[in-house]
Image (cartoon, grey):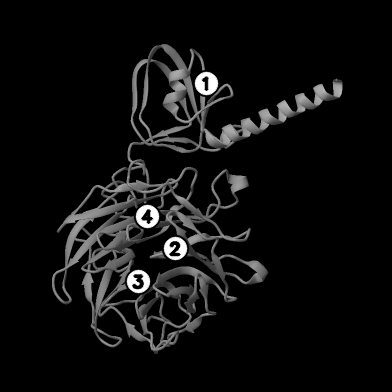
Amino acid sequence: MTIKRNVILLICLLSYVLWANIAYALEPVRIDGIYYSTLQDAYDDAMYGDTIQSRNAVFCEDLYLDDNNTSVTLEGGYNDDFSAIIGKTFLGGNLFVSGGSATIENYLLQDELQCGSGFSDPKTLLPVDDGVSLFGWSVAINGDYAIVGAYAEEEDSDRGAVYIFHKTGPDEWDSGTKIKTGSWIGASVAISGDYAIASDRGQSAYIFKRTGTNTWDSGTLITPTGPEKWSEIGNSVAISGDYVIMGATFGEGSVPGAAYIFQRTGLNSWSSATRIAAADGEDGDYFGSSVDINGDYAVVGASRENDGGTYAGAAYIFQRTGPNSWGSGTKIVAPDAEADDRFGWSVAISGDYAVVGAIKEDEGGSNAGAAYMFRRTGSDSWDFDIKIMAPDTLHGLFGNSVEIDGDFTVVGALGYGGAAYVFKRTGTGSWDSGIKLFVPNSLYFGQSVSISNGNVIVGDAMNGTPAASGTTPDTAYIFLKNP
């Protein structure tokens, strides 16, 4: 009997542990070991003096504190098993207080999160191996494929790597294909159709062709020749159809920066490069520090160009006039340019629109940042369209990264944990107020961004060692636009 009783007790104990583990795995809120799916459910069930504990997660709900007989503590930011506070609870709705009292700890209250935004919850992309550094430093997405650069990955002293992920279902992605070349690839990446490009920082770039479902060839090395050799060539890259562009920020001696455009001539063979440069370029302009290409147009940033003030910045848009021949370029600047705005820190182009990030523009506060939209009005003429700033003031460095695809543009903001904002064009010179995307406990969410068909990928690199810092690991996140 004693043995049977002990066995029964053991079974009951194991059942309780299993139930408890399932409970805390599924429910993000608790009061004294009782778990709830929403903050409101927990509050409605709370008694005077209770502490409502919640995870470091985003809650897409309004919270009504309206019981005159209840005084509670809302304690947020717990880890999965509620054993430690590791961050904050994010309330992505409104907080209404009309009765009773509440002490609120480790909460961040915002009403402009991804809640109800029409985007799915973020899908996390992680490298297939451990110990990868700066994963998410660069990202790009095109159709069912996404590429993530990790240029400080150092397996076998093999420096950088890129990871390509394939969409396998409505909100599912495979574990990724890892590509290494033995060099510092991954500082900048891009993908278009069956081709992906990864910069080999400071030297060249590799172009990879897809040979099957997320299988890729060993890559073709492209290296331009010119006075910018060994001068941050490939620090920025982009690809569109049969054309690839690489920035070369610094020239040898006093030679200004340039960009090089290659045309595909075979299955994965590429022509010698066409060099493009600013007609008024000067040494130190950082021409080539950011690049993009789409169809017959390429855009190049020069974030330290000085015409509007020291380091005010500029960008240049070039039109293709024949097979890999390009015009002299149209210069665009911010209409309200000031010194140290760094206009041209990031650039992107799609169809008749170009977007330029000015990471240190300060209308919204010191280093708040801004993005400027330009619209094509002729074969090679561009007009200023609208200035975009973050709809909130929580993050700075808005414009650290930009991308545009059709009627959607996404802008990364790197300050205070980081965020990304998605804006939709509503008419000529008109864009909506934006949707904010972010994840809890990040340090550098928004380091890199890309968008394709309304779906967004955001890089979150430089987080360090999560166990030591309490942050998320270096990650990339995909937000799918809901139908």
Q: Which mark is residue 412?
A: 4
Regarding mark 2 in the picture, which secondary structure is present there? strand
| Amino acid tagged 1 | Thr
Relative depth, front residue between 237 and 65: 65
Dot placed on the residue nearer the N-terminal end, 1 or 4: 1
Packing grade of label 2 (10 A; few <14, some 14-19, many >=20) is many
Regarding mark 1 in the picture, which secondary structure is present there? strand
Relative depth, front residue between 477 and 395: 477
- Left or right placement of residue 26 versus residue 335 in this view: right
Q: Residue shown at 17%/63% (left/top)? A: 384
C-alpha separation, residue under disc 1 versus residue under disc 4: 36 Å
Dot placed on the residue nearer the N-terminal end, 3 or 2: 2
C-alpha separation, residue under disc 3 versus residue under disc 2: 14 Å
Residue 175, x across and y down, in percent: 55, 60
Q: Which mark is residue 51?
A: 1
Which of discs 1 and 4 lies nearer the camera? The answer is: 1
Are circles 4 and 3 on residues that touch, CB within 8 Å? no
Dot placed on the residue nearer the N-terminal end, 4 or 2: 2
